Amino acid sequence: MAPSLSDYKTGVHNDWCPGCGDFGILNAIQMSLAEMGVARHEAAIFSGIGCSGKTAHFVNVTGIHTLHGRVLPFAQGAALANPNMRIVAVGGDGDGLGIGAGHFVAAGRRNVNMAYIIFDNGVYGLTKGQASPTLKLGTKTKSLPSPNVNYNVNPVGLAVTSGFTFVARAYSYDVRQLKDIIKAAIAHEGLAFVDVLSPCPTYNDINTRDWYAGGGTGGGDGAERHSRIYRLEDEGYDPVVHFAGAGELNEKLGQALSRSLEWGERIPTGVFYHNETVTPYDGRIRDQIRNYAENPPALQAIESGGRATTDVSPMLDELAA
Amino acid sequence: MAGRVDVSWLVGGPQGSGVESAAGIFSGACASMGYHVFGKREFYSNIKGEHSYFVVRASSGEVRSNVSGADIMVAYDTETMLRHHADVRGGTIIYDSGMQKAMISDVATMDRDYAARLGAELAGAGRPEGVEGAVAAARGAGTAVHAVSFRAILSSLAEEAGNPRLRGMTRMFNVIGASLSMAALGIPEEATRAAIRRAFAAKPEVARLNEMAASRAYSAARSEVGRARATLAPRGGPREGTMLAQGYHGTAIGKIAAGCRFQSYYPITPASDESVYLESHVELGVAGSRPGSTLVVQCEDEISAIGMAIGSSIAGARSSTCTSGPGFSLMAECLGWAGINEVPLVITLYQRSGPATGLPTRHGQDDLLFAVHAGHGEFPRIVYASGDVEESFYDTARCFNYADVYQVPVIHMMDKYLASTILTCRRFEASRVSIDRGRLLTRRAGEGYRRFALGGDGISERARLGVEGAEFWCTGDEHDEAGHITEDPVVRAEMMRKRLSREGLALRAIPDAEQATLYGSGEIAIVSWGSTKGPILDALEEVRAGGGPEMRFVQVKMLHPFPASYVAHLLEGATTIVDVESNYTGQLGALFARSMGREPDHYILKYTGRAMTSTELAGALRRVAGGTAGRREVLTYGA
């Protein structure tokens, strides 16, 4: 019997604040796995530390709740040891773009076959609202004693320039679009990144649900409001690299970067960049290890009846005196 | 040790000039003749130009360490001549006559403090502060010193080959120097040429030219050097089942045999050689199965290296990382994660001298207490140390078994001294490697699988990723039996007991013979760990041969949990306890004191970044036996 949505939910109490954007992301992940029919034992959620880190406990597949900033190394190790698993890594923007930023860039260069979702709210929630890497310079949320003195990281732009081969942005209150993007990210051959704008109702009183919905645009309440969020696809934007020629590649990277800089009145969502012409890391491994896909590290036979079965005599012969 | 042939050979030159190849050729020839070989390399943290040297000891009996001094030295650069002429007392020096006029001030690479000390020494004896002074000093000490024009050998080679460009091929000075010294030692020319062919097997043309150079050097040695005072006469050929191994081969091939299939690392001296070896042997033959492979991933930092290895271990592969002190410092937080989540993992720790960057290419055993305590909070671990390269092969397999059976991280302590040795040892026997994966679950579980189920002996079934019906959770937070976060005080206490009781379990179940080894007997007992084993065993022989007392030596292999009762048993009847280790504070001594309730009586320590020689260690042990040793005996030999 095909699994249903409820099969992907655990009974673990969810202690996120009422109104948290993260609920939308959690639902979208569960719906994606259910709709894709991914068997529970064939998927694993890896998470970092922070509110988003608890996601691993709420999805009823194997969940590995790692350390602050380290979700990508753990997840890549698992994905490389058993490429048959569907690995989804999740974490906050402080986790992935502050303490874990080095791993973010290195992961892009590797392009391991998995998906990475950042719950992007601009604040460190569990430590009571300090500015996180995506909060804009000069922004003063209610939990900050003075305006943010650091320039913000551009998650989509950083992903595009680091080598991620599927880069998207979504909004946690548009669960339908979010779910479609997560499904595409999971299906993507290579490393996919989804930056999900997820309002923190407790500590970020600037980038609120109301703000994304158009609060503050048009100078007053009422009819003049318009949502700040728009979909790239509605403007005929084509993120796909079709031929891998240098000209096309530069054009696609350039347009993704350029769109990633839009903020304020108009905030794009959707797929910014999609390139399957780049060989994923497991393909690169197959150049060295011919049967990597059929016999990956985690599934290899290494003993028989408790005796080691690997033949080391070629190595020992090389060293014979 | 009457009748024993024992020759120490020293070669030095600028980093990048082929010092290591020269040592490989010498060692290879000696091993092929049937000698035991033990050599170590000293080098600066530098790519090209700084002083690097190799001391190789070839002997008719087993050798496990270097002695102080050398019987023969070949110097093809000024710094080697200046630094090491005094190491060869009464032996033979062969040097390139091209450097005859060079002064200390011409050697830009020499540490200023060293140059000042050397200059003062030569000037104090009324000698010129340069090569001529060094030559005079050496002759004054009874050393036979031979100047040979290396350039002239190149010229005759160029003439023979009909290629004038060879006159400028100074990069062959290493092979010319090695060959001159090998000729002087009486090593047959064919043995030298065979070793050259083997050293340059991948480059036949280079091998051919170097063989020709060797031949010219042999003729020059006949007319200009003659026989050295020490000789290495032909023996019966290579001993059966002997390998000529480098220090990292033990853990690298040990990992392959033990079924380690994933290694992640970040480049660091002296640990990277192991990973690079694995990278060059990725595809593996496996009896009764399709070919296997080791996936080696070079990471962005050591945090990623250990994180990936943990991820891979959770997926079910035997997984490992290999690092040195600075990298291990970065791994500390992840180590705790592996501890609280009961993840099997082997961290091979090739120590060097710290703290911080310390002496990045020099030896030290300063990380024992750090390995025992690394990471915040309390969690189980095993810290295990190998005493030599051959041991390290079998120990590597043990470490993986301990990790799997007890579901703990295992830190396998190695060091720079072990990493940069070249030595003859018995061929590793893979048939002696057993594999125990413990309670690893690879097939569908019954209902209600819980990764951290309480009860029994505290070790619960560990499903790998992808097993239907055995989904699980892990978290760095305290967790319940399913692996979900909890802050419940009762569960917390139960989980702490579940994890920490494992150390006692390991201590009881791991055979005594794997925890510590006893050598010899006597009322004076040495306790030590790791690579001091070789110098200690050789020093004990030397003390005995010189009419000193028999002493016993307890080599502690399992450092944590500490096998206190077994070590106490091995020390029964000992009146004097001597702690020997390469650090300042006596770290094993501290573990010993807290576990045994008694401090060692003496500490023999060395922290110059150079490994102990058996000679200086024997000297300190004689002082202990003679009642003249202080509480701390500090050793300093070596440049």
Image: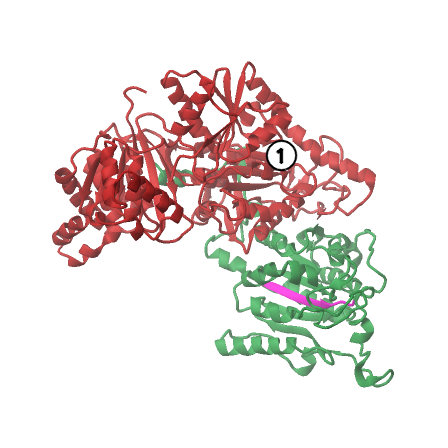
Magenta stretch: give its range. A190-199
User: Principal SS element in the magenta part?
Assistant: strand
Q: Quadrant of the N terminus of chain B?
A: top left
State the residue lying farthest toward the right: A222
Question: Compared with residue B178, is residue A305 higher up or lower down, i.e. above or below?
Answer: above
Query: Where does residue A175 sit, x and y in percent of width and height?
Result: 77, 68
Chain letter corresponding to the colour green = A
Q: Is residue B569 magenta?
A: no
Q: Nearer the viewer, residue A6 or A104?
A: A104
Placement of B523 over or under A253, stated as above or below: above
Residue A146 vs residue B381, the one in the foreground: A146
- Chain in red (letter): B
Kind of residue sitting beneath label 1: Val
For image coordinates 55% across by 32% down, the residue present is B586
The part of the image, by quadrant, that contains residue A117 is bottom right
Q: Quadrant of residue B144?
A: top left
- In the rendered structure, the answer to whether residue B284 lies left or right of residue B445 reads left
Colouring scheme, one of rainbow, by chain, secondary structure, one colour: by chain
The C terminus of chain B is located in which quarter?
top left
Residue B509 appears anywhere in the view? no
| Residue shown at the point (60%, 35%) measured from the top left | B382
Which element is circle 1 on? helix
Query: Pointer 1: what residue?
Result: B405
Residue A194: in magenta span:
yes
How many tags in the picture? 1
Q: Residue at x 80, y 76 (%)?
A: A213
Residue A189: where, in percent of width, then height? 59, 63
Q: Position of residue B368 (x, y in %)?
A: 56, 36
For label 1, count other residues whose C-alpha is less than 10 Å away and answer few (under 14), some (14-19) or many (20+): some
